Image: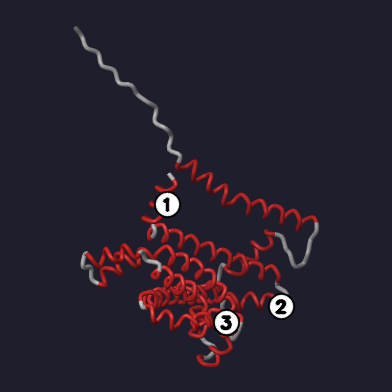
Amino acid sequence: MTLYTSTIVTPRRRSRVWAKLGESTAYALGLPILLLVIWGIWASVSPAPFFPSPLVILQAFVDTWVGPAFFTDVLPSLGRLAIGIVLAVVLGIVAGTIIGLVRWLRELLEPIFEFFRAVPPPVLIPIVAVLLGANDTMKVVVIVAGAIWPVLLNTIEGVRATDAVMTETARSFALTPGERLRYLVLPAASPRIMTGVRQCLSIALILMVISEMFFSSSGLGYKIVYFQRNYLIAEMWSGIVLLGLIGILLAVIFGSVERRVLRWYHGIKEVERA
């Protein structure tokens, strides 16, 4: 008797990675491309001196920023922005963790925080300029003074909201304060902290531009105001486009960092939705 064996081959499903990537790209670029097409048609049919066509702005972008201006204006602005964001995030997390853990300190500082949070950071520019002078330090201080609040307040609330049962469990297992901070408090507060960091990025970008509009002779903010005052409209729009691209770059970097830091959190949410 002969035994024949056969193998049933099931066709493998095609990977949908590329399909999902194409779909995401279409969703991300579809509306901006449509708006650019509408803008280009409108600028051709009804030309306006203050709203040049996208092609004119693109040419001005290349002529203005691809060259010496990238090193004299763009890179210094990005450097000040990066330093301001790092200082705001680090100081906000450290101070917020300490204040969130110490109840009496939190209650003592809460009225002061509410007062300074209500003060618009651009109002502080003349005061900081008088105290520190019109230099790069002043611009960084302005960025930190405005961008620190979302990180600080979200860290305080995140640390404060740490689950009491988990805290007592950590104490019953004789974890040291450093271990509780590392393995319980900061991970539990990390979703709120990342929310504050997201808000910090947009505020820092705005304050970078505003700080360069005053007491400055270089930088993106200065160049945009210079173009506006000299009626270089296409160049002014090119600076605005560059700021938008910087904002997109910050969002991409933040998204990558957030996925790594909150991998466990997104995993729990996926399980809850399943």
Q: Which residue is mark 1?
A: 269
Q: Which residue is mark 2?
A: 230
Which comes sooner in the sequence, label 2 or label 3?
A: 3
| Residue 237 on image: x %, y % | 66, 67
On the rendered image, what quadrant is the C terminus found in?
top left
Label 1 with label 2: CB-CB less than 8 Å: no
| Residue 183 on image: x %, y % | 29, 64
Mark 2 residue type: Asn
Label 2 with label 3: CB-CB less than 8 Å: no
Mark 1 residue type: Lys
Mark 3 residue type: Val
On the rendered image, what quadrant is the N terminus found in?
top left
Q: To which quarter of the image does residue 171 belong?
A: bottom left
- Please state which of residues 76 and 86 is positioned toward the viewer in this rendering: 86
* Label 2: how many Cα within 10 Å (few below 14, some 14–19, many 20+): few
Q: Secondary structure at mark 1?
A: helix
Q: Secondary structure at mark 2?
A: loop
- Please state which of residues 54 and 176 is positioned toward the viewer in this rendering: 176
* Label 1: how many Cα within 10 Å (few below 14, some 14–19, many 20+): few
Q: Is residue 183 above or below residue 35?
A: below
In-image side of 97 versus 232 (left or right):
left
In the image, which disc is placed on residue 119?
A: 3
| Residue 161 on image: x %, y % | 40, 67
Q: To which quarter of the image does residue 226 belong?
A: bottom right
Residue at 42% in and 71% down: 155
In-image side of 158 versus 213 (left or right):
left
